[in-house]
Amino acid sequence: PPRGPRGAAVPPAPGAPPWGPGAAVAGPGAAHAPGAAPRACARLAAGELDDDLPPARIHGDLWSGNVVFTSAGAVLIDPAAHGGHGLTDLAMLELFGFPDLARLRAAYHEVRPLPHDWPRLVKVHQLHPLATHTASHGPSYAAELVDAARSVA
């Protein structure tokens, strides 16, 4: 998605979700938070969740299936590399699971310290993958999408 002046994802139009209507209304959970997605997008567009971190080169599709463990260590495969927020890759691993995630997070923090409020920002960086998965894979992701939108709104 497009980025705001300090790296936060922003919708293409103020208040408009950056995903199709299939994701916005999919699943029974959507009825319980009908305005959550537009409110979350409005906060992103207003820069309320921006930080001062510079863009980072991120994998872009980081989940445990794109990490291969070899005798030499972990190798990342199938990248969709681009400039983005460093928390995006961590949020993806958090969303889809990763063995020993706490250790990986600690190693990341040693190299590039996480912002003090990073736990609340995880849902921000999960909105887009949850929306695209809801739209492309069906309503099984809808409840998580609504939860993330509600926490950001």
Image (tube, grey):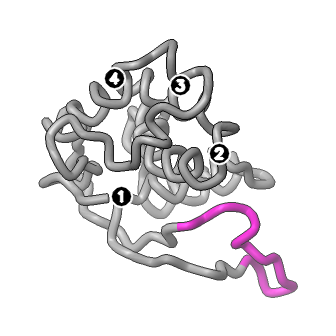
Measure the C-alpha gap from mark 2 to mark 4: 23 Å
The residue closer to the viewer here, 40 or 98, is: 40
* Residue 124 percent coordinates (x, y): 40, 39
Q: Secondary structure at mark 3?
A: helix
Do the numbered discs 4 and 3 sit on residues whose CB atoms are within 8 Å? Answer: no
Q: Of the residues under marks 2 and 4, which one precedes in the sequence?
A: 2
Q: Of the residues under marks 2 and 3, which one precedes in the sequence?
A: 2
Measure the C-alpha gap from mark 1 to mark 4: 20 Å
The nearer-to-camera label among 1 and 2 is: 2
Look at mark 4 in the image and give the residue it sits on: 153
Amino acid at dot 3: Asp
Q: Secondary structure at mark 2?
A: loop
Amino acid at dot 4: Ala
The nearer-to-camera label among 2 and 3 is: 2
**Range drawn in magenta:** 61-74
Q: Split into 4 quadrants, where in the image is the C terminus?
A: top left
Look at mark 3 in the image and give the residue it sits on: 147
Look at mark 2 in the image and give the residue it sits on: 138
Q: Residues within 10 Å of mark 3 (few under 14, many from 20)?
A: some
**Is residue 69 covered in magenta?**
yes
Q: Secondary structure at mark 1?
A: loop
The correct choice, above or below, for 150 with respect to 95 in the image is: above
Measure the C-alpha gap from mark 1 to mark 2: 27 Å
Look at mark 1 in the image and give the residue it sits on: 85
